[in-house]
Image: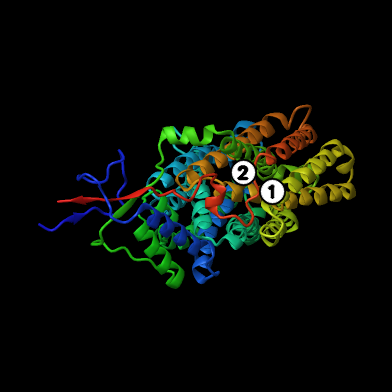
Amino acid sequence: MAANIDNHRSTEKDGSLGSSAGAVAPVAARDLDERRRAALSQVDNASFSWFHVKVCAVAGVGFFTDAYDIFAINIASQMLGYIYGHNRTLNVNQDLGVKVATPVGNLFGQLLFGWLADVLGRKRMYGVELMIIIVATFGQAISGESATVSVLGAIITWRFILGIGIGGDYPLSAVISSEFAATRSRGRLMTAVFAFQGWGNLTAAIVSLVLVQAFKNKIIHDNINTLKHVDYCWRLLIGLGCIPGCVALYFRLTIPETPRFTMDIERNVQQATQDIENVIATGDFYIDPDAAVQRVQAPKATRRDFLAHFGKWENGKVLLGTAYSWFALDIAFYGLGLNSSIVLTTIGFGTSPQKGSLGVYQSLHNVSVGNIILSVGGLIPGYWASFFLIDSWGRKPIQMMGFIVLTVLFVIMGFGYDALTKTHTDSKYFVFLYCLANFFQNFGPNVTTFVVPGEVFPTRYRSTAHGISAASGKLGAVVAQVGFARMKNIGGTNKFIKHILELFAFFMLTGIFSTLLIPETKGKTLEELSNEEQEGFVTGMILSLSF
């Protein structure tokens, strides 16, 4: 009877390979080890190709959608307040709920999908998280009242589910882009993926402005007690976030598995070598279902191995550095990003002096324009400054510089808040400093905290460790959002914001010290950065057959 060869994508559960006993292959372990290193060298030294552009675009569209969905609520929450809030504004708990639900979901999604991508494969999970995002975005847009659940309760639930999908996007996109990238351009490729976040933020503000303008006359003539056309605006603003996700879904489902996962986790050097040759040459991949599966003996991910690896200080300090740096950064990044409408209103850029429906229109218009200014003035330029310098200057210097400058900026904005917001003219200086803070968050730790965890860990733990680092960041986002909501009105409406900015300065200062724990990754291969000896990584080969 002909042998039935195990599918090469099957997952090993107990260390055995198939129903038959493994047989040591005649090929020498040293030859297999050299073949693995030669295959990895092909990826590391590959010329930039259209396949790399495809990886960047497919991963980037996900981050565009993520940012759009996350930051659209910053404007939509004001619209929700006009319709469902008491005295046309959401109370503290309502505002906190709609804003913090997504970061809480992010935290769970990053841990879950980070682990699953190391267990089941990057390709198998890529697209699943985008489907969750699409469904949850649509669910928000059609949320309504019922006898038992308020519309805000439904929105909060959907935003938590949305957060799980968005959270999964972080480790998957980071690891896929890093494992396909050549060493000399890896930083730029990963930064280009992450930079789509800035365009998503800007697009949310532009769409809001377009919708408010489109419904201008109807909003102005709306009954102030119902404002039904503002209801149209927030539903369209949120719902349109489905479109880029739907466009990218097919390409995510058809992207090939990374050769490093196939080689180091599935331990199928032969298939990985074939994948590398096909992908680099044509951008396509092929799996022969009848090919014999030859798996190598190499380090395998287990709980004991995980604890042993990260129990060493030289490895554990890196995870600590990436996790805390992201935590510190997101305290300020989401504390500002999800509350920019409040900041704009506080300095007189969002509040309209007009009363009634005309005032509603003008306030929404001003907040939309203000968010466009903040995106163009700081967020987007910061991403692209990092893009141009990350592979020449390095990740660690950019992160260190960013934390230092942000510390200084938040000290100035916090301790000088009263003077900087005293008059309309003075508030322009505050907006300038606010834009500078956005710039140096992105030309600084917001980019590098995403890039570095996708590079510095072994393949078998790369996605899991990136997920842990990203989840630490979202814990910071939750802390910032809860703290902002609870403290901003101490002493009067928005009176405590200056002290919150001072707290942001403190966390930026701590980020300087956590940066000292991470290595410089510029110009090094992923295997060099893993802190594992590569010569002798493969110790043998097993041929798995079942009859």
Q: Position of residue 504 (x, y in %)?
A: 74, 37
Which label sits on residue 460? Answer: none
Which residue is identified by label 1?
396
| Type of colouring | rainbow
Residue occupying image coordinates x 53% and y 48%: 170
CA gap between label 1 and label 2 equals 36 Å
Closer to the camera in the image, 59 or 40: 40
Q: Position of residue 175 (x, y in %)?
A: 51, 52
Which corner quadrant of the image does residue 313 belong to? top right
Residue 73 against residue 218 in the figure, above or below: above
Kind of residue at badge 1 = Lys
Closer to the camera in the image, 184 or 471: 184
How many residues crowd around disc 1 within 10 Å: few (fewer than 14), some, or many (20 or more)?
many
Q: In the image, which is nearer the foreground, mark 1 or mark 2?
A: 1
Kind of element beneath mark 1 = helix
Residue 220 against residue 50 in the figure, above or below: above
Residue occupying image coordinates x 50% and y 56%: 179
**Position of residue 101 in the picture relative to residue 427 (left or right):** left
Closer to the camera in the image, 490 or 280: 280
Closer to the camera in the image, 197 or 407: 407
Q: Position of residue 214 (x, y in %)?
A: 62, 61
Which label sits on residue 77? Answer: 2
Question: Does residue 155 show up?
Answer: no
